[in-house]
Image (spheres, rainbow, N blue to C red):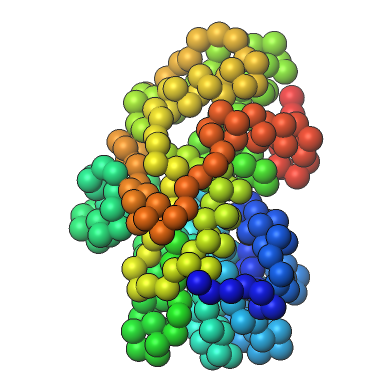
Amino acid sequence: MHTLTGKKIFVAGHRGMVGAAIVRRLEGEDCEIVTAGRDIVDLRDQAAVRAFLADRKPDIVILAAAKVGGILANDTYPADFLYDNLIMETNVIEGAFRVGVERLLFLGSSCIYPKHAPQPIPEGALLTGPLEPTNEWYAIAKIAGLKLCEAYRKQHGVDYISGMPTNLYGPGDNFDLEKSHVIPALMRKAHEAKQAGETGLTVWGSGAPRREFLHVDDCADALVFLLQNYSGASHVNIGSGNDVTIADLAREIMDVVGLEGALHFDRSKPDGTPRKLMSNDRLAALGWRPSITLGDGLRATYAWFLDNQATARLKVS
């Protein structure tokens, strides 16, 4: 077991949903948490990243910073998603090595796997088939990041590891309809429909695709667990072990929000990957399991949403 006691831990991306959850989780450990917003260091600036790491000298780096978004955002800004994520992860991983950081944890994404990967998806499915076209730019960047960690580990013997979270949601999520993922998008649409006195909800595609979701606080707990208990070259999946159709998810969100009416499907919009359920066997074998159910997580997320509409970048009708 790797102790975090007395360690200085830099959480890159602490203002994002995942980074903020990691900071909350680390506050329960006897460690020093280091954070820096873009006003302090732009992770796309190599010289700035090197100078920051040389000055702060962290023992551990958690790389949670990323440019993220849903299908629409990935399709609209492919160059931004590829370039920004490549340059940020390269600068932080290379900079950490230059200043002698002993451990680094890189966060990937379940979109790294092929569109038609076996279900549940094992870690070994990586690079065995074509990616889902609607988010291939982000996926390619994330694959490069985890392979860079493997390369530094192989060539230089550093203890750099990677965790691959499934679809995450929770407090701090982005409810901008042009950039959000499915849960915040549906939750905002349901909320605004209810506020406007409307009934029913329209979802993209057929509603048939199946997706796995994990509350961000469970993800943060799993990441800290990996830092304490794992040291291997292979990335590790981080998921709930269960999936749900988009149609059933939308109905559950309507129930949480209190929106009545029927569910409608806009079949002119893409479905994306038919199913994406990751195997959680490796992480479970290490001794970790999630504790927040989807229903409880959705209710807590909607409560946060109601209390933080400005933070969620929401324009309420």
Residue 316 rendering spot, x and y as whole percentages: 74, 29
| Foreground of the two, 307 or 243 | 243
Residue, x 30% and y 36% (percent of image)?
274
In this picture, is 251 found above or below 35? above
Query: Does residue 157 show up?
Result: yes
Q: Is residue 186 left or right of residue 23?
A: left
In this picture, is 172 found above or below 248? below
Residue 4 rendering spot, x and y as whole percentages: 62, 73
Q: Is residue 93 left or right of residue 255?
A: left
Q: Is residue 88 left or right of residue 270?
A: right
Q: How many marks?
A: 0
| Foreground of the two, 82 or 105 | 105
Q: Is residue 194 left or right of residue 219?
A: right
User: Which quadrant of the rendered structure holds the C terminus?
Assistant: top right
| Foreground of the two, 59 or 309 | 59
Residue 94 rendering spot, x and y as whole percentages: 50, 83
Residue 60 rendering spot, x and y as whole percentages: 59, 77
Residue, x 73% and y 74% (percent of image)?
32
Residue, x 40% and y 90% (percent of image)?
156
Query: Does residue 268 show up?
Result: no
Residue, x 29% and y 48% (percent of image)?
121
- The answer to which quarter of the image holds residue 254 is top right
